[in-house]
Image: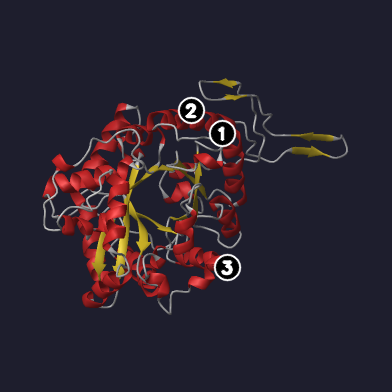
């Protein structure tokens, strides 16, 4: 008898990916609701009704004004405050916020995240980012290099975890007659002194007995080492199954090398979906979404990622690694640049083919264009190949695509024993299997 498949972990972005490109111009896009808090509450409730592990809100602290003017759905609102709002309207789903260790002091991060964890009864999670830009909003002329940012992030996580240990996790002892009000755990200072931070502590905010899951998304060498050492889950931009298999195996090796179990780091590729009732309709949806992207815009995006302007090249000319510069420290996103480098090395596409590739046209994530059945086939294939521990839904093209993704995929996976049929426990860490049953 074949072994039962391992249950998958599924999250969904609250960034409106289904409004990307020209999709917001559709009559049914509901783009006007982006300023309505009820819109995000409704999305989170629908994800909870599908028993998803978590909803996730990305963030950027340096969104350029021109981009905000031309594209709906920018990350201008604070994701942690948004998750705090959602916490009051949901009861089981995990709430994964994003916060930067480059721009937020660890004491502020520790208090903010633990407060969300307490308010949501153990459902908070932290997507750790080191940021790609935004420095001029914080008094810096240039961004620190990747190595420095990750070194700072590692120390920040160390400080934050130490501060969380000072949080009382039980109610205070209260004796009105005796005039006694005493915390069940008297917090002690942490007295941290390091290269980036000097933090006395304690925190003193109300804590929660459930662990607060940590996520991370960088796929560079430095990012992988960081994830292997501290992350409970990692996001991955994996355009193909081979890339995902290699990444997962590599992260597992690195986790073991750092004294953690191989399965401690759950790999969740982004799954960009363009779904419709028929494959032809799905392909039309994808084409219509990107119809307004001009060749000049594609060339500009490609140049921003890999640092080469190909505007003077013939479209039929093949692009090889010899045409690409070395990835220097000033590359904005090393992860995205390395994805394109690998694609070019593997297939040597023509310039026209490269400009139409999903990594340039839209998303660098795993992509399925078709029916829910096609999506299920792809998910089974990746899961059975050991390419992932779950995925994050990035519905694209339309609200009906979002509806199809939520109404069909989790239920179909549950029927096959690949996903839960109901929540067993209420904490985010429990959804991820981070606690032994006897600790519940």
Q: Secondary structure at mark 2?
A: helix
Tag 1 near tag 3, CB within 8 Å: no
Q: Nearer the viewer, residue 326 or 334?
A: 326
Q: Is residue 245 above or below residue 101?
A: below
- Please tell me the numbered disc located at residue 389: none
Whichever of labels 1 and 3 marks the residue nearer the N terminus, that label is: 3
Label 1 crowd bin: few (<14), some (14–19), many (20+), radius 10 Å? many
**Rendered residue at 33%/66% (across/down):** 409
- Structure colour scheme: secondary structure
Badge 3: residue crowd in 10 Å (few <14, some 14–19, many ≥20): few
Mark with earlier residue (2, 3): 3
Read off the residue under disc 2: 155
What residue is shown with label 1?
106
Q: CA distance from mark 1 to mark 2?
A: 9 Å
Q: CA distance from mark 1 to mark 3?
A: 31 Å
Q: Residue at the right extreme?
A: 177
Which residue appears at 72% of the width and 34% of the height?
183
Q: Position of residue 149 (x, y in %)?
A: 43, 32
Q: Position of residue 356 (x, y in %)?
A: 22, 61
The circle drawn on residue 36 is: 3
**Where 59 falls versus 396 (above or below)?**
above
Q: Are marks 1 and 2 in contact (CB under 8 Å)?
A: yes
Circle nearer the N terminus (1, 2): 1
Residue 328 falls left or right of residue 171? left
- Let me know if residue 102 appears in the view: yes
Mark 2–mark 3 Cα distance, whole angstroms, equals 37 Å
Q: Is residue 392 left or right of residue 175?
A: left
Residue lying at 38% horizontally and 64% vertically, measured from the top left: 20
Q: Label 3's element?
A: loop
């Amino acid at each position: 008898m074949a072994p039962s498949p391992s249950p998958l972990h599924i999250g969904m972005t609250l960034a409106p990916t289904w409004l990307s490109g020209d999709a917001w111009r559709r009559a049914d896009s509901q783009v006007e609701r982006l300023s309505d808090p009820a819109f995000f509450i409704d999305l989170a409730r629908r994800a909870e009704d599908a028993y998803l592990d978590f909803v996730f809100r990305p963030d950027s602290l340096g969104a350029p004004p021109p981009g905000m003017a031309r594209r709906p759905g920018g990350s201008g609102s604070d994701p942690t405050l948004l998750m705090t709002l959602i916490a009051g309207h949901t009861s089981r789903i995990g709430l994964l916020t994003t916060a930067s260790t480059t721009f937020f002091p660890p004491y502020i991060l520790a208090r903010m995240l633990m407060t969300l964890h307490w308010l949501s009864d153990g459902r908070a999670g932290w997507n750790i980012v080191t940021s790609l830009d935004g420095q001029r909003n914080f008094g810096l002329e240039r961004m620190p290099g990747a190595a420095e940012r990750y070194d700072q992030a590692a120390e920040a996580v160390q400080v934050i975890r130490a501060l969380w240990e000072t949080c009382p996790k039980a109610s205070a002892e209260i004796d009105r007659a005796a005039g006694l009000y005493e915390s069940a755990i008297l917090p002690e200072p942490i007295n941290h002194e390091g290269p980036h931070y000097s933090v006395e502590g304690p925190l003193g905010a109300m804590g929660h007995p459930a662990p607060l899951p940590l996520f991370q998304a960088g796929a560079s060498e430095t990012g992988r080492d960081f994830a292997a050492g501290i992350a409970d889950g990692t996001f991955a931009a994996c355009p193909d199954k081979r890339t995902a298999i290699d990444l997962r195996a590599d992260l597992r090796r690195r986790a073991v090398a750092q004294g953690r179990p191989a399965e401690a780091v759950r790999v969740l590729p982004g799954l960009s979906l363009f779904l419709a009732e028929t494959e032809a309709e799905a392909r039309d949806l994808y084409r219509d979404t990107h119809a307004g992207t001009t060749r000049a815009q594609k060339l500009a995006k490609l140049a921003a990622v890999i640092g080469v302007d190909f505007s003077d090249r013939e479209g039929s000319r093949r692009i090889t690694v010899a045409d690409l510069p070395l990835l220097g420290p000033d590359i904005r996103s090393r992860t995205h640049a390395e994805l394109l480098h690998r694609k070019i090395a593997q297939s040597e596409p023509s310039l026209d083919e490269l400009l139409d590739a999903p990594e340039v046209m839209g998303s660098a994530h795993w992509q399925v264009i078709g029916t829910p059945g096609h999506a299920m086939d792809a998910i089974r294939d990746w899961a059975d190949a050991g390419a992932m521990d779950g995925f994050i839904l990035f519905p694209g093209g339309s609200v009906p695509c979002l509806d199809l993704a939520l109404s069909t995929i989790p239920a179909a996976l549950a029927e096959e024993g690949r996903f839960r049929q109901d929540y067993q426990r209420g904490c985010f860490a429990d959804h991820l299997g981070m606690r032994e049953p006897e600790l519940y």
